[in-house]
Structure formats: C-alpha cells, structure tokens
Image: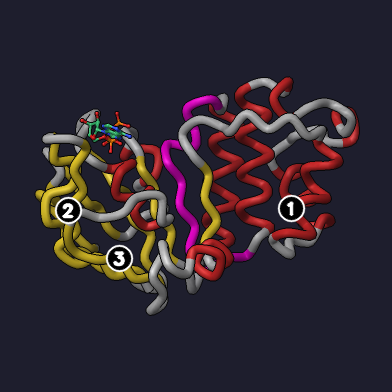
Amino acid sequence: MIKIENLTKKFGSHVSLDSVNCEFNKNESIALMGANGAGKTTLIRSILGYYHADAGSVSINGLDPIKQRVEVLKEISFVPQLPPPIKLNIEELIHYISVSAEVDEDKIMHYANEMKLDLAANMKKSFFKLSGGMKQKLLIAISIAKRSDIIIYDEPTANLDPKARDDFYRLLKQNEDEKVLLFVTHRLEEVKDLVNRQIYMDLGKVVSDEKF
Ligand SMILES: Nc1ncnc2c1ncn2[C@@H]1O[C@H](COP(=O)(O)OP(=O)(O)OP(=O)(O)O)[C@@H](O)[C@H]1O
C-alpha cells in the first residue's frame, strides 16, 4: 500500500530523511518510534505529500502523493500532533467533512459518542475553542468514521486522559482489520497490544524494523 524508496529530505543542509526504504502493507499496525528530531513527522508528511523529496520516491497504492494529492488523501485518515486552528463551529466542520471527504455524519457522531465527547452540547462552539483533549477526540472520531485503508496518527494521545486513551485503543482494535495503521508514538507500552510491527528511526534513518 505504501512504498518508500531511497527517500531523502533535507531542510537546508540538515538531512531529515536519509535514503529511507520501507513498505507498509494491509493488516499492518506499526509503531513508528525514535528520539525527538529522528525524522518521524517528516516521513509522515512525505507520505501525505507535504514535501518534495530531494531524492527517492513515495507511492500510495501506486499513486504519487504530490502529483495525485487529492486521490491520495481520500485513501488516508490522518490525525496530526497538534490540531489545526479551525474556525468553523462543530456543526459546520462535521458538515464540511461529510461533503468534502464523503464521511457519514452519523458515523462521526457515533464515534464521538464512543470517545465520550458530548457533541450535542458543543455544536455551536468553534473547533479552536474546544479543549485540547476534545479536539483530539473529535479528530479521532472523524478518522475512524472516514473508513480509509490507511490511518496515520502522529502522537494522537498526548492530550487524552487515561480513560480516553483506553476508549481510543479499544476503537482502533475494532477497526484495524484490512488497513495500514501507522502510529508515531513515544509510549510503546500503550500500543503494544495493538501493533504488529515496530520501527525505530534515528538521525533520519530506519535503524530497526521488527514484525511479530
Ligand atoms: N519544516 C522544517 N524546516 C526545517 N527543519 C525541519 C522542518 N521539519 C523538520 N525539520 C527538522 O528535521 C528533523 C526531523 O524532524 P521531525 O519533526 O521529522 O522529527 P520527529 O522524529 O517527528 O521528532 P518529534 O519526536 O520531536 O516529533 C529535525 O531536526 C527538525 O528540526
């Protein structure tokens, strides 16, 4: 599904990705780990087509994430490390997503409810006025409701309380079949039961890649 070949990305003279090779396939749940600055977010952003590579290539189901970005993003659900500063209120945001990404509004409501997020009481509130944890819960609900083949999370639980983390992992466990689930995480113990592959990066390289 995701094929990364000899991918190099530099920012000025700094090499953030140094000739990375890896493939992610259906039914893989991957914990992507490594020290701060190792290149994890750069790798994810390259998969999402944010960056032009200095060398090498990324292919998502045979598509180029830069040249065919709209098609590629249809196949991916992504929750970033920091929620984007969206000014729409919740009602408008859910409606916008249902139309633009063809996500069923009822499913978003369903998964928000599973994440114990009281949407009904907050429908007229701007997204950016929600608490950090509430924003993350809504983005998680949308990511699962979207039913993509590829789900990517960049440290999604930083703002979640322990109960919400349990709800999140339970939902993922129920929804991981036939997908690629890629997690950037610093907390392996939390995702151990969920993942079947662990990748460590350091200084822009994949230094260990274990499947089990
Ligand atoms: N837009 C950018 N401009 C300049 N340098 C960048 C940019 N994005 C990332 N870098 C640099 O690339 C390196 C890798 O950063 P990246 O965000 O990919 O690390 P990370 O492994 O996700 O780290 P963390 O665990 O702290 O989130 C860092 O040295 C960072 O400063």
Residue 183 included in the magenta stretch of the image: no
**Circles 2 and 1: CB atoms closer than 8 Å:** no
Looking at the rendered structure, the secondary structure element under dot 3 is: strand
Q: Please name the amino acid that badge 3 sits on.
A: Val
Q: Please name the amino acid that badge 1 sits on.
A: Ile
Dot in front, 2 or 1: 2
Residue holding disc 2: 8
Residue 60 in percent (x, y) is at: 39, 70
Q: Specify the label residue 97 is tagged with.
A: 1
Residue 52 in percent (x, y) is at: 31, 54
Looking at the rendered structure, the secondary structure element under dot 2 is: strand
Q: Please name the amino acid that badge 2 sits on.
A: Thr
The local crowd at label 1, few if under 14, some if 14 to 19, many if 20 or more residues have their Cα within 10 Å, is: some
Disc 2 to disc 1, C-alpha distance: 33 Å
User: Which of 116 and 63 lies nearest the eye of the viewer?
Assistant: 63
- The relative height of residue 204 versus residue 89 in the rendered view (above or below) is below
Q: Sequence order check: which comes first, mark 3 or mark 2?
A: 2
Q: Sequence order check: which comes first, mark 2 or mark 1?
A: 2
Kindly tell me whether residue 195 is visible in this rendering: yes
Magenta part, dominant SS: loop
Left or right of 31 in this view: 173? right
Q: Which range of residues does the magenta coloring cover?
A: 147-159
Kindly tell me whether residue 202 is visible in this rendering: no
User: What residue lies at 58% left-to-right and 66% top-to-bottom?
Assistant: 74
The quarter holding residue 104 reads: bottom right
- Furthest toward the bottom, the residue is 62
- The relative height of residue 11 versus residue 52 in the rendered view (above or below) is above
